[in-house]
Image (cartoon, rainbow, N blue to C red):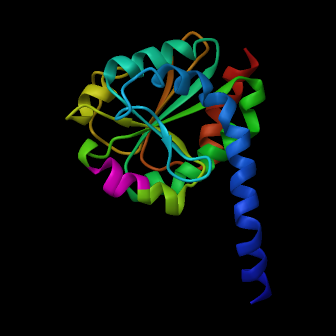
């Protein structure tokens, strides 16, 4: 019982610290969306959580803004169990390697109509420090085809882009943190 009380006491502090650490990565993306109408501007769902609705063109622009960094684009959804298992590992990798030029760019492929009713409450509960893009387009393919025209609709799908924006790895299905780390580290050395 003492362990549960300590966990409940520490959880808000850990969430606040994670939000503080993740905020610099998303500043350019937030700045780009604040000039949009209020309906599409990012707004916090919970302390530190951010959902930024984007279409394919905005995703392309966001990728261009991250040139010079190693980017892991992770396409996920609330209904995808393997996605939810790997997201905490990906968030931890970003926190560990951010200073070396690594950026995690999660993209929720949930139905845009479900963003407020499903995605936001889900993130509030399970990933209160997650900063994610969320698709505005009616179909998932239009979002993923910004990176991969041959996507086979498997989730999760992650793409690791080098500092020039070129795909260096495509990973499908839930993967362990060590698999992602092994693909990212050599790119961070360059």
> What percent of the width, then of the height, locates residue 174?
47, 50
Nearest to the observer: residue 85 or residue 44? 44
Left/right of residue 133 with respect to residue 26 in the rendered view: left
By secondary structure, the bulk of the magenta-drawn segment is best described as helix
> What percent of the width, then of the height, locates residue 53?
38, 34
82 lies above or below 130: below
126 lies above or below 162: below
Provide the residue span drawn in magenta: 114-120
Is 118 magenta? The answer is yes
Is 51 magenta? The answer is no
Extreme residue in the left direction: 138
Nearest to the observer: residue 77 or residue 178? 77
Left/right of residue 100 with respect to residue 157 in the rendered view: right
Instruction: Report whether residue 166 is seen.
Output: no
Q: Which residue is rendered at x = 61% and y = 26% of the image? A: 27
Q: Which residue is rendered at x = 55% and y = 22% of the image? A: 31
Quarter holding the C terminus is top right
Left/right of residue 176 with respect to residue 51 in the rendered view: right
> What percent of the width, then of the height, locates residue 37?
36, 26
Quarter holding the N terminus is bottom right
Left/right of residue 183 with respect to residue 16 in the rendered view: left
4 lies above or below 10: below
> What percent of the width, then of the height, locates residue 12?
70, 62
């Amino acid at each position: 019982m003492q362990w549960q009380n300590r966990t409940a006491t520490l959880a808000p502090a850990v969430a606040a610290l994670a939000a503080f650490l993740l905020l610099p990565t998303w500043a350019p993306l937030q700045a780009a969306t604040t000039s949009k109408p209020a309906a599409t501007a990012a707004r916090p769902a919970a302390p530190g959580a951010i959902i930024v609705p984007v279409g394919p063109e905005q995703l392309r622009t966001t990728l261009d803004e991250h040139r010079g960094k190693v980017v892991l684009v992770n396409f996920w959804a609330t209904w995808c169990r393997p996605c939810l298992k790997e997201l905490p590992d990906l968030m931890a990798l970003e926190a560990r390697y951010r200073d070396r030029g690594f950026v995690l760019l999660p993209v929720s492929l949930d139905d845009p109509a479900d963003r407020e009713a499903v995605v936001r409450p889900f993130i509030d509960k399970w990933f209160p420090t997650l900063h994610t893009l969320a698709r505005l387009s009616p179909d998932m393919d239009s979002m993923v085809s910004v990176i991969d025209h041959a996507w086979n609709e498997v989730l999760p799908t992650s793409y690791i882009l080098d500092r020039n924006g070129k795909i260096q790895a495509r990973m499908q299905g839930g993967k362990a943190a060590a698999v992602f780390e092994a693909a990212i580290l050599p790119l961070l050395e360059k």
